[in-house]
Image (cartoon, rainbow, N blue to C red):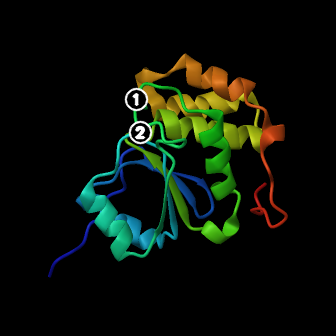
Amino acid sequence: MSSQHFIPPLNYGMIEEDLYRSGQPNELNFPFLEKLGLKTVVWLASEEPNQRFLDFIDDQEIQFHNLGNVGGMSSVSAWDPITEEVVLEALEHILNPHNYPMIVMCNLGRHRTGTIVGCLRKLQKWNLTSIFEEYRRYAGPKVRVLNEQFIELFDTDLVRVPMNRPKWL
């Protein structure tokens, strides 16, 4: 008798019901992701995801939104801070409940994903202390002060909140 193990990807977490975050998964994580019944992946890393993951997305008929080099900036480095344009586009996908269940991810699920989640939390009217505590929990010792500054200065008035927004907003 064989038993299947369900192993979440690196830095996996639930943001809200049917909305998740993580780093790039590998083959060991695919059974876990399959159980989530994902409809949408928002990819934030400047690097392309690995081919096995792209094949998994295709096999599962999951919508894939690659925001890693929005604006055609192929020279984007993993060290470059995320842009306001990317944050607004990611939030547009996140705020559309038709995209759920959804996962937001970058290579390690730390900085770009953490910045998006931080801006979402600001839109949810969380206080900055709580936002930064969550960001730091996933970033570990590799906190980027520029990302925290971006979150603090992010103007939530720029976000188009749809009429059929998620119930948690």
How far across and how far down the image is residue 136, in percent?
53, 28
Dividing the picture into quadrants, the one containing residue 161 is bottom right
Towards the viewer: 99 or 128: 99
Give the residue displayed 78% in from the left and 62% down from the top.
Answer: 165
| Quadrant in which the C terminus appears | bottom right
- Left or right of 39, for residue 168: right
Check if mark 1's residue and mark 2's residue have beta carbons within 8 Å: yes
How far across and how far down the image is residue 102, in percent?
55, 62
- Left or right of 48, for residue 67: right
How far across and how far down the image is residue 42, in percent?
51, 54
| Quadrant in which the N terminus appears | bottom left
Type of the residue with mark 1: Ser
- Residue 168 in sight from this viewpoint: yes
Type of the residue with mark 2: Ser
Which secondary structure lies at badge 2?
loop
In the displayed image of the protein, which residue is found farthest to the top? 145
For residue 120, above or below residue 41: above
Give the residue displayed 42% in from the left and 72% down from the top.
Answer: 35
The label shown at residue 77 is 1
Give the residue displayed 54% in from the left and 37% down from the top.
Answer: 114
Q: Which residue is mark 2?
A: 46
Which is nearer the N-term, disc 1 or disc 2?
2
